[in-house]
Amino acid sequence: MLSAARAQRSCPQCRRQVLSLIERTFAHTQSEAIPLARCRPAPFQRPTARPSSRCFSTTRSRLQEPQPEAQPEAQPPKPEDIEVVVRQAKHAFGDTLPKEYLSEEEYKLYERLYGPPLRETKPEDVGMPVPPEDVEEEEYAYESSDKVVLRETEDGQFEEIVYETEERSTPSPTLESSGVAIESASGEINFQELPSEAGLTYINAVAKNQREFNALLKLQKDFEAASLQPPLPEEDIEEEQREEEEEEEEEEDIDEEDGGEPDATFGHPADRVHEFSRIGHWRTNPSTLQLPKADFVTPITKLLDRTDIKHVKEAAEKAFGGPGLPFSVATPSSKRNAEQKAIPMSAGYHKMSAIDADAFIATLMPGMYSSVMGVLVEIRKRLGSDWMAKLMSRDNGDGPRVLDVGTGGAGLAAWEQVLQAEWDLGREKGKRKGLIPPGKKTAIVGSEQLRQRVSRFLHNTTFLPRLPDYLHSGDHPDKLEGGEASLPRKQFDIIIASHQMMPIKEGFRRKAMIDNLWEMLSPEGGILIVLEKGHPRGFEAVADVRARFLDEFITSPNSDPRPESIELEPRREREPGMIVAPCTNHKACPMYLTPGLTLGRKDFCHFSQRFIRPPFLQRLLGATHRNHEDIDFSFVAVQRGTLPGMEKDILPAQGKEATNNAFSGYENSAEPPDPLSLPRNVLPPIKRQGHVTMDLCTPAGTLERWTVPKSFSKQAYRDARKAKWGDLWALGAKTRVVRPVRLGKGGPVQNDGGVRAQQAARAGKARVITLNADSSGIFSASEAGKAALAKRRTKGGKKAQRADLLKELKMEMETEK
């Protein structure tokens, strides 16, 4: 019986189905004819003549088996042939390679020429015909016995005609030879006579030699066999995916433990690092800081798009010491021996052009953000989460008050990230409500050009043109016009004073700056951070501020007795407080026992923070091989008083007893030690075979060198090898010695008769230059004492060229004008 159903319209899927049905019909008829040709019997061959039989023998006669012909011995392939095979394989399979395609010698040459292959070759890599995706079975589900054909009607539409045909019993060899899968009663599937005709046609057309033909043939057979396999159930697929994920996690753990750059790892395995070692870690997590893209990098990039980066680069090099920007926040390694100067551009400058403001944002802000972030993370670790919780709940939820002096808002951007992370943590626990944490932010920005740019990405911030002078503003109601009482002074919970001491040369002005900042600091647990560049002059500025804090501002149970004053002026009364970081003692700094500048200083307390350069800074520096930068800085963080609701005497015992306990180690201790009573690594640990040496600043106020050998403790030895610069150490050591501080040669240069000694002897004398002139004018100049100096020769024996005094005088006159 024939049944027809009219199709309203023809669609591309219907046409595709018709074409596939027609192809299958013709392929079926061809496959039926092929076995007839293959099953044709071989022509009859008459056997060879039997040898003459021997009459007297009773044994049965046998045919003599043909002896195989002797083949010539296989000669080893020539190097030229091996190279030809390797190049053909590269041309045929690209960056992939079939399994066992090349011999051992050929594979070695392949790796030497092209490197190891990416993976094993797949059918799509060599352009093999892949069947199109199957049509959805739900829409076109027909019975296996139905035959459907579309017939075009007079009005141009199509109708479906389902017809039935008598099924012929086809012998099993025909099905096997047709290249299909035969399903047995047990459910197993046997594959015979693969690949299909289409695959053979493609292989014959592409293969250039017998080796390629065999490889492609095997590849096509494997692919067609896999395509005929029944789909796996969903449970098996989920199990395979789960196993693959577990394998990937194991590989990641192995990579983190064994190899790679230390800053590329996001942390050590939790089951191997001791808990007390993890408490003392200095670094951020991850240790390489990534600047926030949405809140920091993208807004600055949009601001700099208005100006050509070449002009910004020229302005930055002019302001910060030329190529490499040696006088900026970061000093390149090639300029380490350059003059140690303060940053020549500050956020408090009132006269700043538009291009200078762009140079300030692009050059200084990323480094300032990174250094302030490292300091804030360390303070948060030492004071704990209770300190942050008290700050956020201050004055019934008003939040902390933060003042940024010197960074132009970069310090506030770093504080926002720390505060937001703490707020999100409390919100997850159900202690906080809302998305934005409370608080007030204030930044000192003197230039209008810089203020307009910073306000684009620093929201809810008050900008002041200069730092208020609370030191000299007293209560004088009789001199005020607006009323009887003066306005209340602003108090801040956190003050970030970045790169403010070095530009001030006079000691009394530095003292006034510190006094003014202390007056603005809240007496209820306020934190004052003084941060400078990480070179000897910057450390000496910070060490001088630290010494003043201990002598004049704060007192603690571990402080030294106050020295007697010779001055007649009334002295400030010291208040309760403590040094939060980086020091774990309240003694005199072992690297700054002699106040003032020391020439040739080798040891100075500083730390480092690595960050990924944003794209605009990368283009400004013209860097191509490295996209990260290390910021060296020295700092001190001091707390004034304590927060309401917290214990007053929170400072642990420090001194020789705390140092001895730390040397014995807390590895087997049940209670964790207080981080403020542990020694700190002031230099990177020295790793040697079988032992690790660490230079530590101890709670006793001494600089010591501790050695942790492998025989001391397996856990301590492993953690010592993983310790970084700035970490606190709690697992003890086997030996300890006092490490002398290398302060350099601060005295006068010895007069040994050399060129440097003679120049040093003449350093304090005025230069005497004699000018020779006639009626036409000055024609030569000579300097007294220059001829007496020893003449240094170069490698070639030529004398070094002396400076032209006339040109030097002209340049000095032009600069004076």
Image (spheres, rainbow, N blue to C red):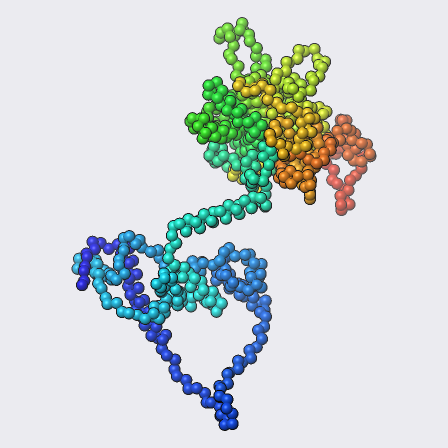
Q: Quadrant of the N terminus?
A: bottom left
Closest to the observer, 593 or 585: 585
212 relative to 793, above or below = below
**Rendered residue at 23%/66% (across/down):** 165
Closest to the observer, 223 or 611: 223
**What percent of the width, then of the height, locates residue 546?**
65, 23
Q: In the orientation shown, which residue stands out farthest toward the front? A: 58
**What percent of the width, then of the height, locates residue 31?**
33, 69
The quarter of the displayed image where residue 565 is located: top right
**Rendered residue at 73%/33% (across/down):** 737
Is residue 684 rendered to the left or right of residue 441?
right
Report whether residue 729 is seen. Answer: no
200 relative to 448, above or below = below
Is residue 774 rendered to the left or right of residue 350?
right
**Rendered residue at 27%/69% (across/down):** 168
The quarter of the displayed image where residue 809 is located: top right
Report whether residue 396 is seen. Answer: yes
**What percent of the width, then of the height, locates residue 326?**
62, 34
